[in-house]
């Protein structure tokens, strides 16, 4: 449940959260707005000649996309951000991080399946090891000793990336109501991944909906300052998110490391000693 969590911090509403169980955190799934803005610098630094006002992202539906983007931004400003701010005020950072860890932990079956489909046995083995360690030692996934103590890296594979590895092109850039930045390939991937969310088979809808809402609000609360900073610094926030999302997903497909110049919330989510990075409001 965590990665659309990634994704997509813009309007993380219940619909987004219900799809999130199958996407890995997010966000990294769909990409969070903070991540999108952060990766924009990396995208611009690649060996590509960027001209003023030019976008290398195929966006034939830009007028419609901008309208939906503005709707999502308004929904986030009037609902998601205020609720997440209240959550951030009430919940200690340690608790927020544990919640994030737990929902990320639940995405193991989907990540493992995509590791196998992409013929990445080492990642499949490591993800399985992370699941065992964090289940047994990390109190059911509330903590992440697999990263901090065992040194097992965390991977983030989804079916959108799997399709990309198989050679399926992303198609035109899309902004989906409530769900945020996407494209046809990632949209199909999100749907397929949602079918593999094992918790949907044994939990009732009210429980799933409540848990999804908590996950979405919690993830939004972890990126409050980052999203505000990106909105303020971007000349055209729509273009920044479009560039960042597209470059981020392309890097994911080809297993290229993304190193934002400014640390995002995800980098220290499992290192509870660094909670001052976020600050309790």
Image (cartoon, rainbow, N blue to C red):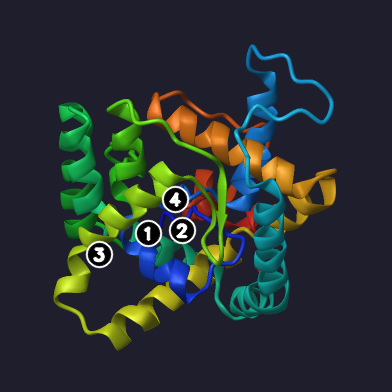
Residue to which mark 4 is pinned = 29
At a point 67% along the width and 14% down the height, the residue shown is: 48
Q: CA distance from mark 4 to mark 1?
A: 15 Å
Q: Tell which circle, 3 or 2, labels the residue nearer the N-terminal end.
A: 2
Front: mark 3 or 1: 1
At a point 76% along the width and 28% down the height, the residue shown is: 54
Q: Residues within 10 Å of mark 2 (few under 14, many from 20)?
A: many
Question: Which disc is residue 5 wearing?
Answer: 2
Quadrant (top left, top right, bottom left, bottom right) of the C terminus: bottom right
Q: Quadrant of residue 53?
A: top right
Q: Are marks 4 and 3 in contact (CB under 8 Å)?
A: no
Q: Tell which circle, 4 or 1, labels the residue nearer the N-terminal end.
A: 4
Q: CA distance from mark 3 to mark 1?
A: 11 Å
Q: Are marks 3 and 1 in contact (CB under 8 Å)?
A: no
Front: mark 3 or 2: 2
Q: Is residue 97 left or right of residue 230?
A: left
| Residue 239 visible within the image | yes
Q: CA distance from mark 3 to mark 2?
A: 21 Å
Q: Tell which circle, 4 or 2, labels the residue nearer the N-terminal end.
A: 2
**Which element is circle 3 on?**
loop
Q: Tell which circle, 4 or 3, labels the residue nearer the N-terminal end.
A: 4
**Which element is circle 1 on?**
helix
Residue to which mark 3 is pinned = 139
């Amino acid at each position: 449940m965590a990665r659309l969590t990634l994704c997509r911090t813009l309007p993380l509403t219940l619909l987004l959260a219900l799809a999130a169980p199958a996407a890995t955190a997010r966000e990294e799934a769909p990409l969070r707005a903070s991540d999108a803005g952060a990766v924009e610098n990396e995208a611009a630094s690649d060996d590509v000649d960027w001209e003023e006002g030019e976008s290398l992202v195929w966006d034939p539906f830009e007028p419609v996309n901008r309208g939906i983007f503005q709707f999502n931004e308004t929904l986030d400003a009037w609902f998601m951000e205020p609720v997440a701010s209240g959550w951030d005020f009430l919940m200690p950072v340690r608790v927020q991080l544990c919640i994030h860890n737990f929902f990320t932990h639940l995405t193991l079956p989907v990540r493992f399946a995509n590791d196998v489909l992409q013929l990445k046995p080492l990642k499949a083995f490591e993800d399985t090891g992370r699941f065992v360690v964090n289940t047994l030692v990390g109190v059911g996934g509330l903590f992440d000793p697999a990263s901090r103590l065992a040194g097992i890296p965390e991977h983030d594979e989804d079916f959108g990336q799997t399709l990309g590895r198989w050679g399926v092109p992303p198609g035109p850039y899309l902004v989906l109501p409530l769900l945020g930045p996407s494209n046809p390939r990632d949209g199909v991937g999100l749907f397929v991944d949602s079918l593999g969310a094992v918790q949907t088979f044994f939990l009732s809808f009210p429980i799933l909906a409540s848990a999804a809402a908590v996950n979405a609000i919690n993830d939004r609360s972890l990126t409050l300052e980052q999203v505000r900073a990106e909105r303020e610094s971007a000349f055209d926030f729509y273009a920044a998110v479009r560039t960042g999302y597209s470059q981020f997903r392309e890097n994911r497909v080809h297993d290229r490391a993304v190193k934002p110049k400014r640390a995002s919330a995800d980098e220290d989510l499992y290192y509870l000693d660094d909670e001052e990075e976020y600050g309790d409001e």
